[in-house]
Amino acid sequence: MAKRRGPRPGNTEEKKGWREQLVALRSIPPYLKLIWDTSPGMAGASIVLRLLQAALPTAILYVGKLIIDEVLRLIESGDGDTSYLWKVVALELLLALASDLLSRATTLIDGLLTDLISNRTSVDIMRHAATLDLYQFEDAEFYDKMERARRQTSGRGVLMAQLLAQFQSTITLVVLGVSVVAFNPWLILLLVVAVIPSFIQENYFNQQKYSLTRSWTPERRELDYLRYIGASDVTAKEVKIFGLADFITDRFDELSMKYYFKNRDLSIRRAGWGAFFSIIGSVTYYGAYVLIILQTVEGVITIGTLTFLAGAFRRMQQGLRSILSRFASIGENALYLQDLFDFFEIKPNIADRAAALPFPGTIQEGWVFENVSFRYPGAEKYAIENLSFTLPVGTKLALVGENGAGKTTLVKLLARLYEPTSGRILLDGRDLREYRLEELRDNVGVIFQDFFRYQLTVRENIAVGRIGYLDNETQIEESADKSLAAEVIAGLPGGYNQLLGKRFAGGQDLSGGQWQKIALARAYIRDAQLLILDEPTSALDARAEYEVFQRFTELISGKSAVLISHRFSTVRMADVILFLEFGKRLEMGSHEELMALGGRYAELFRLQARGYE
Ligand SMILES: Nc1ncnc2c1ncn2[C@@H]1O[C@H](COP(=O)(O)OP(=O)(O)OP(=O)(O)O)[C@@H](O)[C@H]1O
């Protein structure tokens, strides 16, 4: 279980300074590669379009200057030949049209490319998550990382547009800069004075925002969880019966408002400083304007040049400002991006060893537990302790023991969802860790007590046991016959194509026992060498469970199986019974042997039997 953390506003804020931000910029090149790999055509088109666009502002301003100077010339000279004037006006019109078209095309391509990148990243995250270990999913910090990575998929498309826009603005700025310097180099100095302080302020607040967002990841996850349990088909029943709506919404409200206030304080400070620096910006602009006006009055430059320089200065000021603030926000986004790449860096611990062995086509001997102990990561107590026993191939083993005795844990070890903390599990004399993981999982079929109820069709719900059989009707129907699910399916209006669950339109829900029969069909279709039923039959009554287990052991005769049940009437049919207590082996033997032993098994068996008399 993921640990639930209470709100801890502010106390875990990580300060991310300049250095971290620069370090985070390292994730930009792999990100650019990701963009390029996603669609070289669109990425290339976007770059070319932006290059074309970059030169346009200067060209338009310059043509504007030519128009004004020509108009003035015509007025002053009384010359009636306006052909040059109309040519430059037409040129300006063409440039304006081109600018409009180019920017629309860029927006379109960027939007499409962003969607593709977001899809691709989502798929990559899902694929990567699937390779990770079960214990990683049971760790709150892992969830936080995954959550941060997941958020990148929707939010980080912006980064691409920012990088490309940065490229374009820089070129525009250089072109404008060169032409302004040609007229008056002092203007550039004024520009820098006006913009740099505002850049520093912008950057500071971006870091603050990132720290806040990052330190609140657990709380945001909690908010998502509360939102989910507050309004979901799975919880609606309990929320109503227990009257939990206020409890959940109040908790959501409290936590979300705490975040709101933290965020609000930051936003207000940011807006305040932002306003201050934009006043500085405006004052310097007018300073520059006065400088140019004076030059014009003195006749150093023409009126056309005045409009060109005033326009160019304003554009450069805006351009430089947006380049710098974009730089800060690229730095910030790179920090987030780092989270995404960090997530991809998480490697599973349970993986194939070098030169892993193929899983035996037919298991010869079976399994041997040699002093196996296992402790869950972070847990103090051992869930399995010093356990030794043999499970010969073809044996039906039943596991019994009180809640928390370690039955499910043992099953997870057999399926190599976890590996022993110490000791070994041998299969045909070789450590389970030596076999190829994928083949091992293919050969072990487990139906857990908390098996998942997929809100998919009946057919898909059975085929998840062996997804390659999704289109194999014979296998699906045979499995349903064996698990007695066929009777349930016959009563459904859509038969095998009936959508199950209430989440989607046309879905139909099943009773607990009916779901279990469907889930059991997964064990039959899996057709693995070792089949494990971890109490997936608890919703059936004692007789039905007995029948299901008996049918199961008959139908899979010759195969190895592990059965877990709290009902001794069911358990007795197994060849061997292993009684666990606090993760240790208490008793082991056939029903008859354990009864003859007169120990805990015999005692509990009699206790349950009396209950049925
Ligand atoms: N993911 C986990 N992380 C930490 N501890 C766990 C985890 N799963 C189980 N445990 C602990 O390990 C012990 C054994 O649990 P296990 O689920 O194997 O018991 P069980 O015999 O299957 O119980 P039940 O009959 O209730 O299904 C328990 O003390 C439990 O609290």
Image (spheres, rainbow, N blue to C red):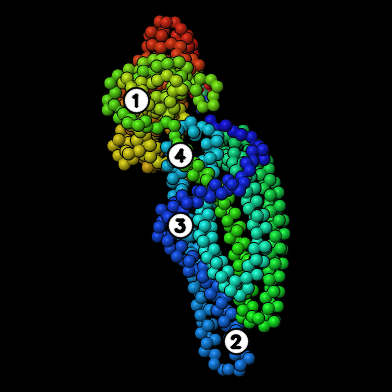
Disc 3 versus disc 1: nearer the observer: 3
Mark 4 and mark 2: Cα distance apart in space: 67 Å
Which residue corresponds to the image point at 49% horizontal and 44% vertical from the top-left? Answer: 341
Indicate which disc residue 129 carries: 4
Q: Which residue is mark 1?
A: 530
Q: Counting other residues with Cα less than 10 Å from the Cα at mark 4, is it few (<14), some (14-19), or many (20 or more)?
A: some
Mark 2 and mark 1: Cα distance apart in space: 92 Å
Callout 1 amino acid: Leu
Indicate which disc residue 71 carries: 2
Callout 2 amino acid: Val
Which residue corresponds to the image point at 42% horizontal and 5% vertical from the top-left? Answer: 597
Disc 3, ligand 1: is the CB inside 8 Å?
Answer: no
Callout 4–callout 2 Cβ contact below 8 Å: no
Mark 4 and mark 3: Cα distance apart in space: 24 Å
Q: Earlier in the sequence, mark 4 or mark 2?
A: 2
Return the x and y of residue 475 as percentages of the image width and height.
30, 35
Disc 1, ligand 1: is the CB inside 8 Å?
Answer: no
Mark 3 and mark 1: Cα distance apart in space: 47 Å
Indicate which disc residue 113 carries: 3
Identify which residue, 152 or 484, lies in the foreground. 152
Return the x and y of residue 545 as percentages of the image width and height.
41, 23
